[in-house]
Structure formats: structure tokens, C-alpha cells
Image: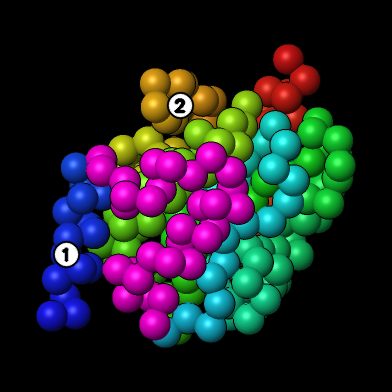
């Protein structure tokens, strides 16, 4: 049945087993190809495009969002809609730019899941569980010095914590990815900041914390 590969993929991901062809991936392009061939995620059927990553693979900073929205689904690139435009302005305020060629000013951007959930609903546990091996392998290969989680979904998946984002944000923690500990800062999602502009002052503090972590 159609449900069986879904359940099997979730179960395997929960046990920490990566899909067979993922372990042999040694480049981001190979991970993207493995995602294109991964049919177990039901979101793939309703999405227009795979939305894997954007930015510079040699960047010191990796940003992880939640899920592609409408504009991202159309363009197949993360954070290209209104949230993405705000994100680009926030990054510019601390000298970061997804188009930068030098690794110190660059960012690499991806999401917790790689297909748009219908109507932009929050991704389910199963969906984020299934996509996690791809995100972890991306981190292993991209080797960021710092991971910034935009919103609660990536922060929960990468740290195992379940507190709300207002509690998590601004406090450095770590992601452990194949034995390597990587400093991780949860911050507010730009979509939330568009709805709650007064909270931009908190986001600004987090941006300064990122800047200072990169210069130390
Ligand atoms: N929101 C996200 O979390 N990710 C995107 O790529 C776009 C909007």
C-alpha cells in the first residue's frame, strides 16, 4: 500500500537510519539528487518543486528554516518570498549575504523539510522525521561553524528540545552531528516578525550574537 513506504521511512529515520543512497552521498548535489529520488514523503506529491537549499556551500553560517512556502515551491529555492526578503535585510544588517562569495560573509540556507506542506500548514512529526536524515547529511557535508535555526521547528529537530521559540531564542546551544558539536542559535522566524514587528528587537539581539560568534 501507499502508506507502507511512508511508515517505513519514518521508522527508519527514528532509528537514525538514513535512506540507503544517502550514506554514499558526498556532495550537496548528490543529496539533492537523493531527495529528488526519495518518494516516501507524501508532501512530494502535492508540491510543485523540490526546495533544497540556496546560498554558498562554503559559508560558515547555515540557516535552517521550517518549510518552503508558496513562492519557494514555485522557485524551488528557500526563503525567496516575503519572509526571505526580510531575512535578506536582517542578514545584510550584520554583513551577511546569501550571494557572497567569501565564506565569512556568505550564508547557506536550507529548511527542515524540502517540499511545501499543502496550504503552508505546519509540517507533521512524521514529515520532519523523514526529512531529518537529509538535513543531518547536509550539515555533515556543508560543515557550518554556526547553525542558526529560524523558528521552533528546526530548533526542536536539531536539539531535541521542545520549549517554545520565545524561550529557546537567543540562547546558544549545540547540535551534535555525527559526533561533531556545532554551536546553534535559535532565533525568531522572519514570518513571525512580519506578523509581530515589535519582536524585531529580540531578533536584532540574536543577529548581534551571531555576528559576535563569527568574529571570535
Ligand atoms: N519559511 C521557511 O521556513 N522556509 C522557507 O523557505 C520560506 C519560508
Is residue 41 within the magenta segment? yes
Q: Which residues are magenta?
A: 16-45
- 167 or 214: nearer the eye? 214
Disc with the residue nearer the chain's start (2 vs 1):
1
Which residue lies under the disc numbered 1?
7
Residue 15: percent from left, percent from top: 19, 42
- 73 or 192: nearer the eye? 73
Q: Tell me which corner region of the image, top left, top right, bottom left or bottom right, holds residue 158.
A: top left
Which residue lies under the disc numbered 2?
174
Q: Residue at x 48, y 67 (%)?
A: 36
The mark tally for this picture is 2
The single residue placed furthest to the top in the displayed view is 216
Residue 85: percent from left, percent from top: 76, 65
Disc marking residue 175 = none
Quadrant location of the N terminus in the rendered image: bottom left
Q: Residue at x 30, y 68 (%)?
A: 40
Residue 113: percent from left, percent from top: 44, 61
Can you tell which of label 2 and label 1 is closer to the viewer? 1
Is residue 30 within the magenta segment? yes
- Identify the secondary structure beneath mark 1: helix
Confirm if mark 1 falls within 8 A of ligand 1.
no
Amino acid at each position: 500500500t501507499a502508506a507502507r513506504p511512508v511508515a517505513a521511512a519514518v521508522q527508519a529515520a527514528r532509528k537514525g537510519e538514513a535512506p540507503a543512497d544517502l550514506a554514499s552521498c558526498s556532495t550537496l548535489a548528490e543529496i539533492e539528487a537523493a531527495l529528488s529520488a526519495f518518494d516516501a514523503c507524501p508532501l512530494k506529491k502535492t508540491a510543485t518543486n523540490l526546495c533544497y537549499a540556496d546560498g554558498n556551500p562554503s559559508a560558515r553560517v547555515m540557516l535552517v528554516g521550517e518549510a518552503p512556502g508558496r513562492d519557494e515551491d514555485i522557485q524551488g529555492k528557500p526563503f525567496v518570498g516575503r519572509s526571505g526578503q526580510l531575512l535578506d535585510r536582517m542578514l545584510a544588517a550584520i554583513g551577511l549575504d546569501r550571494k557572497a562569495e567569501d565564506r565569512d560573509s556568505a550564508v547557506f540556507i536550507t529548511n527542515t523539510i524540502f517540499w511545501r506542506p499543502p496550504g503552508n500548514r505546519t509540517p507533521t512529526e512524521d514529515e520532519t522525521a523523514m526529512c531529518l536524515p537529509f538535513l543531518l547529511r547536509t550539515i555533515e557535508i556543508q560543515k557550518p561553524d554556526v547553525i542558526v535555526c529560524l523558528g521552533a521547528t528546526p530548533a526542536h529537530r536539531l536539539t531535541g528540545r521542545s520549549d517554545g521559540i520565545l524561550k529557546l531564542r537567543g540562547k546558544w546551544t549545540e547540535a551534535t552531528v555525527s559526533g561533531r558539536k556545532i554551536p546553534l542559535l535559535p532565533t525568531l522566524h522572519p514570518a513571525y516578525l512580519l506578523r509581530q514587528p515589535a519582536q524585531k528587537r529580540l531578533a536584532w539581539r540574536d543577529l548581534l550574537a551571531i555576528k559576535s560568534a563569527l568574529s571570535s
